[in-house]
Image (cartoon, grey):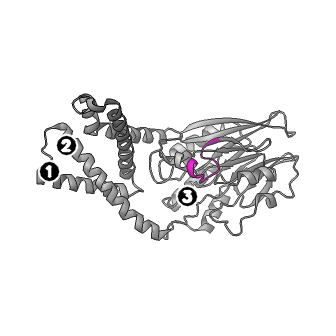
Amino acid sequence: MNVMLYISAPILAVLILVFYYYFVRRACMATGIIDTERRSVRAVTLLLAACLALLSCSIFSLGAIFSLHVIAVALLMQFINFIVKCIGKSKYKNGFAVWKKIYGSGIVPVIVAVAMMVFGFVNMNNIVETDYTVYTQKNIREQGYTVALIADVHFGVSVDITELKSICNDISKKNVDIVVLCGDIVDENTTASGMREVFAALGGITSNYGVFYVYGNHDRQPYTDDKTFGADQLRKTIEDSGITILSDEVYAVNDELVIVGREDRSYGKTDRKSIADLISDVDRNKFILTVDHQPTEYKENGQAGTDLLLSGHTHGGQIWPANIIFDLFGLNDAVYGYTRINKTTQAIVTSGLAGWGFPVKTVAPAEYVIIKIKGK
C-alpha cells in the first residue's frame, strides 16, 4: 500500500499541475487583458500552477480541500461546456459570449469552493441536537429509555472545553437514562491535559444509569510515534471520571436492557470477539443495545440478535464527496443516519460532535444524538 502511495502521489501531482496550468491560462485568456503567449506570462502561470498542485497534494490541509473543490467544480463546468458545445454546434464558435466569459474566467469554481469552506466552517462550529425514536416489540417499561449518543469529539479540532461543558449541561437537563460515548473522543492531536478535561466533562453528565464508553480507532493515538498520553493513562482517566469502559463486554443495565460494548475493529482484527459470542448468554427477551465505533457487521448483528446498534467513525462523510465514495465502495455498512437492518435490528450512525483533520464539515451536521427507545 505504501508503494502505491509513493507511485500515485507524483502522478497525481503532475495531473493537478497540468490541470491548473490550463485552468489559469484559460482564465487569463478570458479576461483579454493578459497576453498568454508571452514567455514571462507562461512562466508565471506554470509557477502558480505548481504552487496550487503542491497545495493540493498536501491532502491533510485546509488548502488542499479548497483546491480540490476548485478542481471538482471546474471539471463539472468543463462537462457543462461540452454539453453547451453539443447543443450550440456551429453557433458556439461565434456565440454564447456570456457563457464563455463565465466558463473561461474560472470564477464559478473559486466562488463555489469559497462558499463550501465558509459553510463547512460554520457547520462544524454549529453543533445541533439530532433526535431519533426507535420502536421495539420487546417488553420494556412504559416510558421507554432515552439514550444520549456522543462520538468523534476529536478534542482539539473544533470543540473547546467551554462549548463541551455547555453541551454536557444541556444533556444533563434532558433526564436521559444512558449516555454512550462511541469512540474517538480524543485523537493524536489531543494533549494529556485536554484528554483529562474532555473526560471529566463527559463523565459529569447526569444520567439515570451511567456513562458508557467504547474505544475508537484514534483514542489510543495509534497513528503517531509522539504520543501525548499512554493507553493505561487514558484508561485510568476515563475510569476516574466515573465512566464505564466496555471493550468486548456486556453490561446489564437492569432486568430488561443490556449494553454490549465492542472493541474497535482496528485493534481487534485477531482477537475481537464476534457479536454472536459476546451475547451468546444474554437473555433474548432483554433489549440488546450494541455500541461499536465503526458501523460494520450489520448483517452479523442482525443475525445475532442486536436490537439497536450505535456507531460513529464516518463523520457523515465530513467532506463532500467523501460520503459518496464511502457509499460507492462500501467502506462501511452505513455512512450516516438511521438504518433498519432487519425486522428486529436497527442501527444509527452519528456524524459526531466534530471531525478529524480539518476544521470544516460540508456534508452532515456536527451533532450529539438523543434516542428514545419505545415499546409498541
Q: Callout 1: 10 Å neighbours few (<14), some, many (20+)?
A: some
Q: Which residues are magenta?
A: 327-337
Please indicate, yes or no, whether residue 205 appears anywhere in the rendered image: no
Of the image marks 3 and 2, the number of the one nearer the N terminus: 2
Which residue is nearer to you in this view: 84 or 354? 84
Of the image marks 3 and 1, the number of the one nearer the N terminus: 1
Quadrant of res 29: top left
Residue 28: give its label: 2
Give, as a three-letter code, the residue at label 3: Met
> Relative to 204, does residue 245 appear above or below in the rendering?
below
> Residue 15 in the image: x percent, y percent?
34, 56
Which residue is nearer to you in this view: 110 or 358? 110
Quadrant of res 233: bottom right
Give, as a three-letter code, the residue at label 2: Cys
Query: Residue reaching furthest front?
Result: 90
Pointers 3 and 1 in contact (C-beta within 8 Å): no
The Cα–Cα distance between marks 2 and 1, rounded to whole angstroms, is 9 Å
Which residue is nearer to you in this view: 52 or 132? 52
> Residue 362 in the image: x percent, y percent?
47, 42
Of the image marks 2 and 1, the number of the one nearer the N terminus: 2
User: What residue did someone put label 3 on?
Assistant: 195
Which SS type dominates the magenta stretch? Answer: loop
User: In the structure shown, which secondary structural element does the residue marked by tag 2 occupy?
Assistant: helix
User: What residue did someone put label 1 on?
Assistant: 41
> Relative to 249, does residue 371 appear above or below in the rendering?
above
Pointers 2 and 1 in contact (C-beta within 8 Å): yes
> Relative to 277, does residue 169 appear above or below in the rendering?
above
Please indicate, yes or no, whether residue 50 appears anywhere in the rendered image: yes
Give, as a three-letter code, the residue at label 1: Val
Residue depicted at x 39% and y 63%: 9
Q: Nearer the viewer, mark 3 or mark 1?
A: 1
